[in-house]
Image: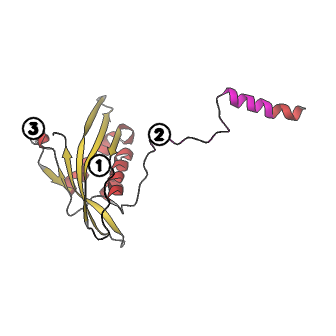
Amino acid sequence: MKKAIIPTVILVLFAGLGCDLFSIPKEPEDPVPEWQLPITPRAVIEDIEWCYNNADGPSYTTLLDEDNFVFYFDRGDWGGDLDIPVSWTYDLEVEATQNLFYAVGAPNITLGLTIDESDEPGPYDTTFRIDDVAYDLSVHVPEDDMTYLANAHANFELSKFEDDTGLMRWWLTKWWDIVTG
């Protein structure tokens, strides 16, 4: 009889504490995407999201075409007090992004991308566009207790070529930020 009391007490405690030992664990509603090999254009764009959410500068640099990358700012952002240029290339993009990651860290950056189901490139395509990608970016600056929000769209152009290891993969070559209509 004493042997039956201990398992009964344990079950009662677990049930009383709200533990559900006998159900299948639920998947999170929005699972955090994992890093993917950049062998599809979509994987590259989803890896950009991963890099921002993990503040991973070194991985971010592997997604951009070092020789051909250009980031185009939205027309509404050009000039102004910050003297924002029309565009910038790989070095400035990497420097700015890594400075952001270093300054605030992963817990303070949230990027969500919404990519509509788009066609996949053909087997012989070497360039591909993914347009009208909605994004929500939140950056919290703890020292100033300020949160900056950006909700807009972006267009991406990617190119496919072989990397140093012989892998045929996709690289981000052009990124257009589209804030205004």
Residue type, mark 3 in image: Gly
In percent of width and height, residue 56 lies at 36, 50
Residue tagged 3: 80
CA gap between label 2 and label 3 equals 41 Å
Q: Nearer the viewer, mark 2 or mark 3?
A: 2
Stretch of the chain drawn in magenta: 7-31
How many residues crowd around disc 1 within 10 Å: few (fewer than 14), some, or many (20 or more)? some
Residue type, mark 2 in image: Glu
CA gap between label 2 and label 1 equals 30 Å
**Quadrant in the rendering for residue 171:** bottom left
Q: Nearer the viewer, residue 90 or 129?
A: 129
**Numbered badge on residue 29:** 2
Q: Residue at x 25, y 37 (%)?
A: 150
Decide: is 158 above or below 15. below
Residue tagged 1: 98
- Left or right position of 46 against 131: right
Q: Is residue 159 magenta?
A: no
- Tell whether label 1 touches label 3 (CB within 8 Å): no
Q: Nearer the viewer, residue 119 or 166?
A: 119
